[in-house]
Image (spheres, rainbow, N blue to C red):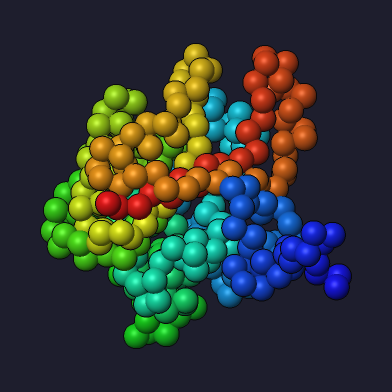
Amino acid sequence: MNNIDLFGNEIIKDELLRDRFMEPPFSVLDSKNGNWQRRKRLWKQKGIKSEIGRNVKVINNTFTEKYGREGMPEESIFDPALTELLYYWYCPTNGKILDPFAGGSVRGIVANYMQYFYTGIDIRQEQIDANIYNALEILPYNNQPKYYVGDSNVVLDEFKENSFDFVFSCPPYSDLEIYSDLNGDISNMNYECFLSAYDSIIKKSIKCLKKDCYAVFVVSDIRDKKGFYRDFVSSTKKCFIDAGAMLYSEAVLLQPLGTAMLRANRTFSTGKLVKVHENVLIFKKI
């Protein structure tokens, strides 16, 4: 009787939803909760070292404003618990995953550990080398993520259409973090060129995705040099819709506060709120 309300309806508790879905499938994902943090710790204990290979150059104040310090912040390293959750929700069993902005090792290691087949593209050889080394430390030799070094706008042309079951990535946030000075690295382009290359990569990624399958990008808005938001989240939605993948769901990912309490006093003196969330955009190819 404890699970029935006054009208005879079943009461579904968070614990029951977690038993079935890993996390409650709500439009707000709270990475601060105990279950989430426990899963994150378990992944880290396996030996994931996603920060290795990332030689980030900071060239504007947006990065420092967001993270509060120079260098590679923990907040910019992709969350393995979020990765696990989104694979579980949106990728079919033994599915093939395409990541056009591979970055660190998290998404590849989690994918193959969960018996998916991950293919990631990154323009930096040192990043791919670091990812391969880290994956070999954790995964069996015969179960390794597949990586390609190069500009996704070029590499994706070699992939077959409708050959992947899930597209999943976290793209560069324009020049918030500069990863290299290589030609084709969209993080070192001006914003107009960045958006053009970004749009092309999304279109080619969706071309590789099977019909009725999902694509998920984790993004956040970014400021221009005058401090105004560029509305990068809306630009991302438009790129996917133009590519034939419609916006199907979206969620707000609440992040641990970290240094946000310390930064708020300084940041709000200029009227800017401290950002403590990212946007999880879920698209479905039609």
Q: Nearer the viewer, residue 91 or 67?
A: 91
Q: Residue at x 70, y 48 (%)?
A: 256
Q: Is residue 46 above or below residue 8?
A: below
Toward the viewer: 232 or 126? 232
Against 10, residue 126 (above or below) is above
Taking the spot 59% from the left edge, 58% from the top edge, the residue there is 25
Residue 273 at x, y percent in the picture: 67, 25
Residue 282 left/right relative to 262: left
Residue 261, image quadrant: top right
Given residues 210 and 11, the one toward you in this image is 11
Is residue 137 visible in the rendered structure shown here?
Answer: no
Whole-percent x and y of residue 124?
A: 32, 52
Does residue 286 show up? yes
The spot of residue 54 in percent (x, y) is 45, 51
Looking at the rendering, in which quadrant would you find the N terminus? bottom right
Left or right of residue 103: residue 32: right
Left or right of residue 208: residue 40: right
